[in-house]
Image (spheres, helix red, strand yellow):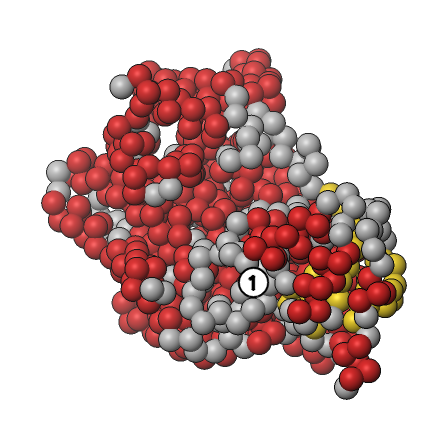
Amino acid sequence: MRQLLEEFWQAVAQYWGNWRILALFVLAAALLLGIKKYGLYRKALLTLLLVLLVLVYNPFAKLFWSKVMQEHLYWRMFWILPAVPLLAFVMTGVLDQKAAWKKGIFAVLVAAAIVLCGKNVYTGGNFTKAENKFKLPQESVMVADYMLTEDGETKAIVPEELFCHIRQYSSRISLLYGRDILGFTAPVGNKRFHKVYEEMESQAPNVRTIMRAAKKYDCQYVVFDSSKLLRGDPVNYGYEKKTQIGRFTVYRREEKVKNE
Amino acid sequence: MIGHLWSLLGLAVYLGALPLGLGYLLAGRKGKTGWIARYVYGMLGMLAAFQVACVPLVLLHRSLLEAVVWWHILMAVLAAAASLAGRKPEGWTGEPETWKRTELALAAVAVLLLFLQCAAYGAGTHIDNDDARYVANAVAAYESNTMYRYHPNNGTVMNYFMGEIGKETTSPMMMFYAAVSMVLRIHPTIMIHTVWAVVWVAVSYGIYWMLSVCFYPDSRKNRLIFLVLAMVLQIFGNTSIYTASTFALTRAWQGKAFVPAVVMPFVLALFLRRWKDPGYSWYPGLLLIALSACLCSGMGVYLSAILIGAAVIGEALRERSMKTLFLGACCCIPNAVYTGLYLLVHLVIIR
């Protein structure tokens, strides 16, 4: 029982982030319960809250839902809790005063409660200025553009900083591996791909390992992070340094072109 | 030049005239419905029609173009059915009043806050690596006229719905984006990161406005205060990276963000309308939101069913009516069907 409670509390804490906002929500629910002036919808909101508490938000329900869905995703259950509508409804009621001075005091209190308990979504680096109309990092757009201009349809090995973005720009660029190498979408089973990824992300990539795999799997391009010290020269494997885009160096396989 | 004109015209039609027109039929044709509610209903109608059209085609490995054609056919069927059913006005608008100075000031604040939240998506970027799957799927579909045939992360041809792609086969929100992009000839990444993000923020607050109409049918001032407070609470709701507000305001285009931003307030709005007026037929709305939620994400299938279930149980308890419980449960049939299909894909087809 104690473990159940602890796990439930952990999920609650994980979702709400701080106790102040949770306390504000509990206070709003208590006000709704205690003050009858909220009228017809007081009972509606309390009934819905009660049903959700029984069905979803308690340690036993968590145990059940954790078995139905992935356990570590239980926090998403809080997405269906009508927290913002309930808080806004209660706060509107609090502000609905006849005397102007009371209204003023409550307005200040409500604003202070929201600001002190919450956290602004537009701070903390959530948003940066858009670099292009695709809303992708400009370097990834330029690298992709370069490859497409040269080859139309192609395949590449790129560093982690680029592999999440390249295929959002164009699906005509295939990658030896993308975010799947990190276990997302459909985990990569090929051990050689993992070895290549490890070398690509290391501080001193082993060029031999990377370029041999690039050749074997027909990757026309290999893009290196130029801040890293390469152990070996890609030129020795039939690749030519074509361009430098930001901090990325683009190598292109020339043999294939000659053969054609 | 002609391409640009087509895209602009398409934007006006698919993000303006079409949802308003469909909403006009779905939410009631007389004056009391309000254009905001009509727009919301219309958008949900577009999503619901796409869900019904697209899932079988995805499972049959058909092209995106076929999905586009069937989507339009089903929207026409939906419009015809709504037209024949002759829905009563939904009453999502307050009584007309003359505007007072305080109300004008509050309206200005609400518009400013909405503008700022939309501008963050318009001029700013929130990079989210989950897009390596979501958006890349839409781009691959748009560029190849296929649906889920290429691995979004690396581009290899998929002979079956690999890994997490299985979830998207029954919740093909990204194909919806690709379909609209195909018609409008605008790259899906531009549409998703800018246009759709702004549309969902606007739709979300449209639903909050509908909620305010429920709460305060006779007071425009309180409706506006409620809306402003909801916006401020959303903006200051980033207390963790998991909160509903964080998802709604940083990655609104992703299907999972649709649940807290649209599904939750919409079900609540229907519940409150029904609570006030037990004669109000909330079932078409519940069915519409269930289908839309199924389109948006795998979590949407579960979470919308749980929330609709909770609302229906609450209402059935109040009315002491088994009929309400039964009809409400019927509105979750899409959720059961798509869960079944998902399990079929996972347990049978890919094995």
Given residues B284 and A186, the one toward you in this image is A186
Q: To which chain does the residue with label 1 belong?
A: B
Picture coordinates of residue B185, whole percent (x, y) = 63, 74
Residue A156 visible in the snapshot: no
Q: Which residue is mark 1?
A: B152
Quarter of the view holding residue B178:
bottom right
- The local crowd at label 1, few if under 14, some if 14 to 19, many if 20 or more residues have their Cα within 10 Å, is many
Picture coordinates of residue B14, whole percent (x, y) = 54, 68
Quadrant the N terminus of chain A occupies = top left
Quadrant the C terminus of chain A occupies = bottom right
The residue lying at 51 percent from left, 35 percent from top is B242
Given residues B65 and A109, the one toward you in this image is B65
The residue lying at 85 percent from left, 59 percent from top is A233
Mark 1: which amino acid?
Answer: Pro
Quarter of the view holding residue B308:
top left
Q: Is B101 rendered above or below residue B333?
A: above
* Left or right, B134 with reference to B47: right
Residue A157 visible in the snapshot: yes
Q: Secondary structure at mark 1?
A: loop
Q: Is B17 rendered above or below residue A35?
A: below
* Left or right, B13 with reference to A150: left
Picture coordinates of residue B267, whole percent (x, y) = 35, 45
The residue lying at 60 percent from left, 57 percent from top is A192
Picture coordinates of residue A258, whole percent (x, y) = 82, 82
